[in-house]
Amino acid sequence: MLSRTASSLYWLGRYIERADFAARLVEATVRLDVLSPRPAGELAWGSALAVTDASEAFAARGAHLGQQSVARFLTLDSTHPGSILSCLDKARTNARAVRTALSRDAWTAINRAWLVFDGRSSPGGASATINLIEAVKAETRGFEGAIHRMLRNQTTWFIRLGQAIERADNTARLLDVKYHILLPEGEPVGGVVDRDQWTTILQTVSAVTAYRWLYSDGLTPANVIDLLIARHELPRSLAASADEAVEFLSHLAKRTGHHGEADRLARARHARMMKVRSADVILGGLHQYLDDFLDENARLHHAIGRQFKFA
């Protein structure tokens, strides 16, 4: 496989995953905003920007921090590289470059997701925004299903590797922002706002039902942290992302013969994740742990590019 083809497939996976995460984040924030008293709602939109590392870019616009302006920025702003529209546009460009490697279902899902935004200039109010997000999520789920039905070969492994790296990054940022920023001053830990916000985190990673299956002692921050870091059963956990990175790199090494720094980094991270205990992470400093994880994930991303010669 040519390095530029590998690059397009890998980035296709990352951009689709990034668009899906942004959609889920906007949806959860809209719901939290509706439920929360002021200023908790405004703070929720500020946290959505922080999770996507877009606070400075949004501030440069000089817009009011609220649902209409932030939702438009994160969904429809073509000048913001992290908006859903921008991510889908980049995903579509990469998909077009490897069109013959994709199934018709996979290409159609990407194209339809991009067309959801055709002719739109605003996401609308809360209900309209939710409807827009649901349409995007339906197509990203369609793409995910199409990938699972394709041949298990280099095409699917590069796409899913990109998704795994992106998913790890998104979950770590989401958890870090909630733990350190989101709760308004004066609001009690364990209070209504705090519980609503932790529920929103679970909604963003599609883990509300999973949480209820795995924990019987009610909603607690410690359990949510445990779920998102250490539970391999949850597809969007850090542990599951580490599992997948090793798996797909192993498949690619056997098929392509490219084996090196990325494999070593992925296996070392996986070995640590197999031993991680969320209680120890919290005691040792969650913020520092997540910072280190994000740095390690970035190193793995760059190592993948060098190993497959598309850095």
Image (tube, helix red, strand yellow):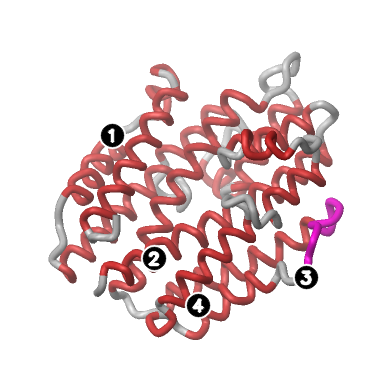
On screen, residue 37 above or below 203: above
For the residue carrying disc 4, how many other residues have a C-alpha within 10 Å: few (<14), some (14-19), or many (20+)?
Answer: many
Say what amino acid the circle numbered 2 marks: Ile
Instruction: From the viewer's perspective, tell me whether residue 108 is left or right of residue 259.
Output: right
Q: Quadrant of residue 290?
A: top left
Instruction: From the viewer's perspective, tell me whether residue 267 is left or right of residue 117.
Output: left
Find out whether residue 42 is within the magenta segment: no
Say what amino acid the circle numbered 1 marks: Lys
Residues at marks 3 and 2 touching, judged by CB atoms closer than 8 Å: no
Say what amino acid the circle numbered 3 marks: Gly
Residue at position x 58%, y 50% in the image: 82
Residue ID for mark 3? 119
Closer to the camera in the image, 311 or 226 = 311
Bounds of the magenta span? 119-128
Instruction: From the viewer's perspective, tell me whether residue 278 is left or right of residue 2.
Output: right
Q: In which quarter of the image is residue 78?
A: bottom right
Tag in front: 3 or 2: 3
For the residue carrying disc 3, how many other residues have a C-alpha within 10 Å: few (<14), some (14-19), or many (20+)?
Answer: few
Say what amino acid the circle numbered 4 marks: Ala
At mark 2, the secondary structure is: helix
For the residue carrying disc 2, how many other residues have a C-alpha within 10 Å: few (<14), some (14-19), or many (20+)?
Answer: many
> Any mark on residue 159, and which?
2
Chain-order first, disc 2 or disc 1: 2
At mark 3, the secondary structure is: loop
Residue ID for mark 4? 106
Question: Residue 30 location in percent, x, y?
Answer: 77, 46
Residues at marks 2 and 4 touching, judged by CB atoms closer than 8 Å: no
Marks 1 and 3 sit apart, C-alpha to C-alpha, by: 50 Å
Marks 3 and 2 sit apart, C-alpha to C-alpha, by: 29 Å
Residue ID for mark 1? 275
Marks 2 and 1 sit apart, C-alpha to C-alpha, by: 28 Å
